[in-house]
Image: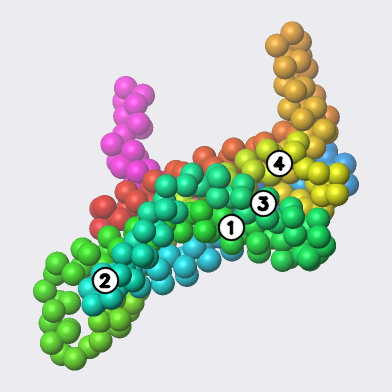
Amino acid sequence: MATDGSVSPTVSGKYYRHKDIVWLTAWIAGMLLLWIWDALFLNKPALVRLQTALVNSAFTGIMVVVLSLLLGWVAGVVLHLLGRSQWKKTFALATLSVNALRSIPQIIVVLIGYAVLTALLHEEIIRSMFVQLLWIAGVIALAVVLEVVDTVNERIEYFRTLDFVDAMLCCGISESRIINVEILWKNSRSHLLHKMIAIFGISIFLQSSIDFIISVGLSTDVSLSNLPLTLGSLLATLDSKQDILAISNILSNPGYLPRLFITHLQGLSVAFCIVFTLLCMFNIANGFQRRLRLT
């Protein structure tokens, strides 16, 4: 701390160099403190629902990261190889498909996927909750996969300008090995990890938004009880909505504020999980990107 009360440059510099670690620690600590508080004051059925929703949302987010990485890696490499091959018509068709997907807003892609899932549930083709979560993860991964494809292509194009690629080709090393091992695995893992952190946050946002939206438009044959419980669907329940609306009471009665964190915990906890996770993921990704620029 400086003598004038301001933060010293050393402390500020350390924060910006380790911003991702600071926010990751804050996220873990915040979620742990929330669980302890809910365990003390939230009734057991609501606590079980909150834990289930959090686990389902986190599982879906992780699966989105895994699926989008695999699909984006393969698609990016295939597009690059097609662009340098003699299969110009196939490359043009693949490029057209990618551009068509790029032109559709991500939320529309996810809505279409949920509509198909609703139809499958109505026909009782899909019943397993695990399969439903995988379906949702696959749809969100399809919506965000171009983020990974662009990163893969950017890294490949950057290293193609360096001499070591031509040198390795002259040594008889296959181009696919150079791209997958030397460029992407050995020299681009940090960039892909940064993209995966951002995609995890995007997946939480998309899933929570869509689950909340469709909660008011489901048919009588497919209700919220048929779909996996997530943070978005739990926020859409009547109890959670009433808990959120209870915040307005503090405008006319400020003394009601302490009661919010005891009698209206379900809605506030769900909202906190969503907003705090998105805030932390944004700052973790931002801090990790800054670390990449410094190295």
Tell me which amino acid carries mark 2: Lys
Q: Which residue lies under the disc numbered 3?
A: 114
Q: Which residue lies under the disc numbered 1?
A: 139
Q: Residues within 10 Å of mark 4 (few under 14, many from 20)?
A: some
Mark 2 vs mark 1: in front: 2
Tell me which amino acid carries mark 4: Ile
Q: CA distance from mark 2 to mark 1?
A: 29 Å
Q: Are marks 1 and 3 in contact (CB under 8 Å)?
A: yes
Quadrant, the C terminus: bottom left
Tell me: residue 212, above or below residue 122: above
Q: For mark 4, give the secondary structure.
A: helix
| Residue visible at 77% across and 53% down in the picture | 227
Tell me which amino acid carries mark 1: Val
| Residue visible at 51% across and 47% down in the picture | 106
Tell me which amino acid carries mark 3: Tyr
Q: Earlier in the sequence, mark 1 or mark 3?
A: 3
Q: Residues within 10 Å of mark 3 (few under 14, many from 20)?
A: many
- Identify the disc placed on residue 88: 2
